[in-house]
Image: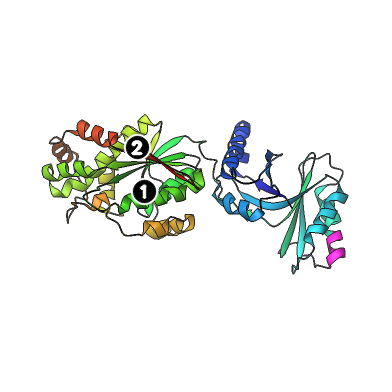
Amino acid sequence: MKSVVIHYQEIALKGKNRPWFINRLVRHLRLALADLDVPAIRSLMGRIEVVLGPSTSYAEVSDRLPHVFGIANFSQAGRTEPTIEAITAGVLRDAAGRTPASFRVTARRADKRFPFSSPEIERHVGGAVKAAFGWPVNLNHPDLTIRVEVVTSEAFYFFGKEPGPGGLPPGVSGRVMCLLSGGIDSPVAAWRMMRRGCNVQCVHFHSYPLVEGTSREKVRDIAAILARYQQRVRVFQVPFADLQRQIVVSVPPALRVVLYRRFMLRIAERIAKKNGARALVTGEVVGQVASQTLENMAIIESVASTLVLRPLVGLDKSEITIEAQRIGTYETSIIPDQDCCQLFTPRHPVTRARPEEIEQAESMLPIDELVRAAAEGAEMEDFHPRMVQSTTR
């Protein structure tokens, strides 16, 4: 069985735009499997076939496909000529050695010119399997489902299927810039936007050398994990310490956190516009911390002219934690570090800041100069699933 059959779901609903979405999925599959022996990846009437070369195992491919957005499910498959005899022979050959408690056959005939209907295929193949192996038939809850799919010039058969991540292929929804803190929430927010077809770039704010460089290293590790889903993640590391010093000496303590975040949005927006990102993404959740009340979130967002997306806004911490564990970022996110927003944080930050007091506090600061200096001081790094390449802006 030297093929993998991939099915998509949401893409199938795209109407006249469907071929473009399928082409993007095929393109991303080629990137994800580029270093493996995969002679061909073909779109075939509502499914995609990945042809495995002699030196590539199904295990190697199946380890990567759960990270390719756009895939609903996939299966190791055998390919035969589109005849009932060839299909039956292939199924009997590759089913040998299995010992299921029960089975059924499910057939799909994409090419209606095939002389057997789907129920006829099921009866013919199922009868041959029962005669050869004696397995009992269970149409409702089978231990093994043998699937047969007939397309124009070939037929496929496979035993069971594995779930894909769903969603849309990377890049079909445009580019966004995610504020990546290194905590639990923002990597999940980035992943969720990737799953909706966005190409996600990230910006991280750090206070090195005032604090240890742990947060920068954590973000590098998280970016490499996220790159498994997108093949490349670009991160802009922004030095924030000098700006924080000026806020500390000029602004009342209770307002510092709100001002930190307003400046972060300004800087992220500047970097986003320069790099073609159409929206900013944050890991904010309503009511989770003092800066994430509705009043504070509105005041923070007001400095940006770019759309701000909050994919986690209605979740609670346990839901986000479960998702972080599932996508593989949780263990890195919980490594202790010194986040830049924890530096010079007051004991009692304001929870419902008023616009006039924030504007008064910011009037003491050279906003444009601080934003420009921080954005120009950002270091750019590209992360790939199997390599890391660094560049300095």
Could you give the CA–CA distance between mark 1 and mark 2, rounded to whole angstroms? 26 Å
What residue is at 24 percent from the left and 43 percent from the top? 240
Determine which quarter of the picture holds residue 31.
top right
On whether residue 133 falls in the magenta region, the answer is yes
Residue 356: percent from left, percent from top? 16, 38
The secondary element bearing badge 1 is classed as: loop
For the question of whether residue 166 can be seen, the reply is: yes
Three-letter amino acid code of the residue under disc 1: Gly
Which labelled disc corresponds to residue 283? 1
Q: 209 left or right of 380?
A: left
- Residue 110 versus residue 346 in the image, above or below: above
Residue range highlighted in magenta: 127-141
Kind of residue at disc 2: Thr
Q: Which mark is residue 392?
A: 2
Residue at 61% x, 35% y: name it.
23
- Colouring scheme applied when the structure was drawn: rainbow
Q: Residue at x 13, y 43 (%)?
A: 251
Along the viewing direction, whichever of 208 and 283 lies nearer the viewer: 208
- Is residue 201 placed above or below 89 in the rendered structure? above
Question: Can residue 15 be seen in the rendering of this structure?
Answer: no
Q: Residues within 10 Å of mark 1 (few under 14, many from 20)?
A: many
